[in-house]
């Protein structure tokens, strides 16, 4: 990890992907570029103008000829002096060129160090820096578009505007704190409460679109759970279009969890088949059920499956709830599936009026499966356009959740101004952490170490 004061060392890295290519780029950033350039190619080219140069090794032999581009500080990616050397994309040439730069005093850059310097020099906030990595890693056009918007500073702007509102509200409260309780105007307290409501609403919205963004970035984890033999594995096979999971009329066949990545309406989904939950003394089955509990704990969506042929509609929710409900993580989305309707003759698809959302299907015939898939996509919130999606990371969701919780506490304490002020302070610091305004070093290390070298 680089030290926190940037720019004290000249760094260099191959910025293009490993392997052969038409063009390869070595990038340098930091002090002392003029000396390196002098030894390597006779001097720095004019700023921001492509110059054809011959790059020479220590013995004066040609390494390669190529384009040199010089971006003087501060108008560069890192905010420091930056030099880019474009040569033929041969790993041998690139390695020799990098080696020459190191001979001349540069140090090989750590992963993400160029972007870290950009952040430390105020060229971008933390959400933008992360967006650089997200854009590079984007697995779909949609994810790339979201990353680009974040790179543009949109996420940071929204967070900063929220933080600003928190600051204003805090100032209002601080002003009240100077007066005895009974002298404080009732209408002022109402105004504070209204401000907190607005804030909570906006943080909630951002959290919601961040969750959808996470689905776009990491895929949605959808867990199939229920009693043995209800048809979870059959449903898994039907939805993945494979025979991946073993299906059997014997209960307790699935003892381990199975995961299959699929795409539903363009959204990456990780479908997880689990061991059936029931009372069992078999140690292997108990292990399987422990894994099921773990999977449920990590799920974005839990689909609880019921064998429709085994109980009539009025008793179906009672059939599943005592086993599953205590395991559900807070705020997890749920869908109930009535399976095996080929045996009951029920109408496939949405069971209207039921809560949670319920779909009648037959894993055997495929009836109702399309409706179920559409419902899953809709729950991921990525079905309609999804342009407002924030490509959030777990870090962002964590900070936003903290902010939302602090705001909820604050709202419950509008009568106690000191406590209220304290909750708003927590809200503000959670938001500031997102943009990196109060960044701990280990947080930065964690974020930037995941970058590729040369970025
Ligand atoms: N008729 C009918 N049988 C099904 C359906 N889905 C599963 N089954 C049968 O129910 C039994 C248990 O299925 P399985 O997928 O192994 O259930 P799991 O234990 O929940 O994974 C097997 O004999 C399946 O063939 C369905 O939609 N209709
Ligand atoms: Mg099974």
Image (cartoon, rainbow, N blue to C red):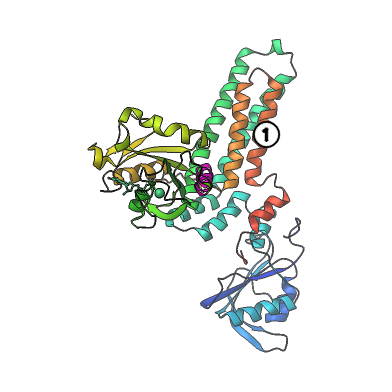
Residue at the farthest left position = 345
On the image, numbered disc 1 is attached to which residue? Answer: 426
Q: Residue at x 58, y 33 (%)?
A: 404
Name the dominant secondary structure of the magenta segment: helix
429 with respect to 342 (left or right): right
Which region of the structure is painted magenta? 284-299
Q: Position of residue 263 (x, y in %)?
A: 39, 54
From this viewpoint, is residue 2 visible?
yes
121 with respect to 302 (left or right): right
- Dot 1 falls on a residue whose secondary structure is helix
Which quadrant is the N terminus positioned in?
A: bottom right
Q: Is residue 389 magenta?
A: no
Q: Position of residue 17 (x, y in %)?
A: 55, 71
Residue at the farthest top position = 182
Q: Is residue 293 magenta?
A: yes
Q: Position of residue 44 (x, y in %)?
A: 68, 75
Q: Nearer the viewer, residue 334 or 183?
A: 334
Q: Residue at x 65, y 62 (%)?
A: 114
Q: Position of residue 178 (x, y in %)?
A: 75, 19
């Amino acid at each position: 990890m680089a030290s926190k004061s940037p720019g004290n060392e000249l760094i260099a890295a191959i910025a293009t992907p490993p392997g052969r290519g038409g063009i390869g780029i070595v990038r340098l950033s930091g002090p002392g570029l003029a000396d390196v350039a002098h030894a390597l190619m006779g001097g720095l080219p004019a700023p921001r103008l492509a110059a054809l140069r011959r790059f020479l090794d220590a013995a004066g032999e040609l390494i390669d000829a190529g384009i040199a581009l010089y971006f003087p500080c501060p108008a560069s990616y890192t905010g420091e002096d930056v030099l880019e050397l474009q040569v033929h994309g041969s790993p041998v040439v690139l390695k020799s060129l990098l080696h020459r730069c190191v001979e001349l005093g540069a140090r090989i850059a750590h992963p993400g160090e160029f972007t870290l310097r950009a952040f430390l020099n105020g060229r971008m906030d933390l959400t933008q820096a992360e967006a650089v990595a997200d854009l590079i890693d984007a697995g779909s056009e949609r994810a790339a578009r979201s990353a680009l918007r974040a790179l543009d500073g949109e996420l940071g702007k929204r967070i900063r505007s929220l933080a600003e509102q928190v600051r204003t509200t805090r100032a209002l409260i601080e002003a009240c704190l100077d007066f005895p309780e009974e002298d404080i105007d009732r209408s002022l307290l109402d105004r504070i409460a209204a401000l907190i409501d607005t804030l909570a609403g906006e943080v909630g919205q951002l959290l919601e679109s961040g969750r959808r963004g996470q689905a776009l970035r990491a895929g949605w984890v959808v867990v199939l759970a229920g009693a043995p033999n209800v048809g979870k594995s059959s449903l898994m096979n039907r939805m993945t279009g494979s025979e991946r999971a073993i299906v059997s009329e014997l209960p307790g066949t699935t003892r381990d969890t199975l995961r299959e990545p699929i795409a539903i309406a363009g959204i990456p989904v990780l479908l997880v088949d689990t061991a059936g939950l029931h009372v069992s003394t078999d140690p292997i089955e108990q292990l399987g059920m422990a894994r099921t509990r773990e999977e449920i704990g990590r799920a974005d969506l839990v689909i609880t499956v019921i064998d429709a042929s085994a109980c009539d509609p009025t008793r179906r929710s009672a059939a599943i709830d005592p086993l599953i409900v205590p395991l559900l993580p807070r705020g997890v989305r749920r869908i109930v599936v009535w399976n095996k309707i080929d045996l009951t003759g029920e109408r496939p698809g949405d069971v209207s009026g039921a809560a949670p959302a319920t779909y009648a299907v037959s894993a055997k015939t495929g009836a109702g499966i399309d409706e179920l898939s559409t419902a899953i996509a809709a729950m991921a919130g990525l079905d309609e356009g999804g342009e407002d999606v924030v490509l959030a990371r777990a870090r962002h969701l964590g900070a936003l959740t903290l902010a939302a919780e602090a705001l909820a506490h604050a709202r419950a304490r509008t009568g106690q101004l000191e406590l209220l002020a304290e909750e708003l302070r927590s809200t503000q610091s959670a938001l500031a952490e997102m943009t990196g305004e109060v960044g701990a070093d280990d947080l930065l290390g964690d974020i930037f170490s995941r970058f590729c070298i040369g970025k």
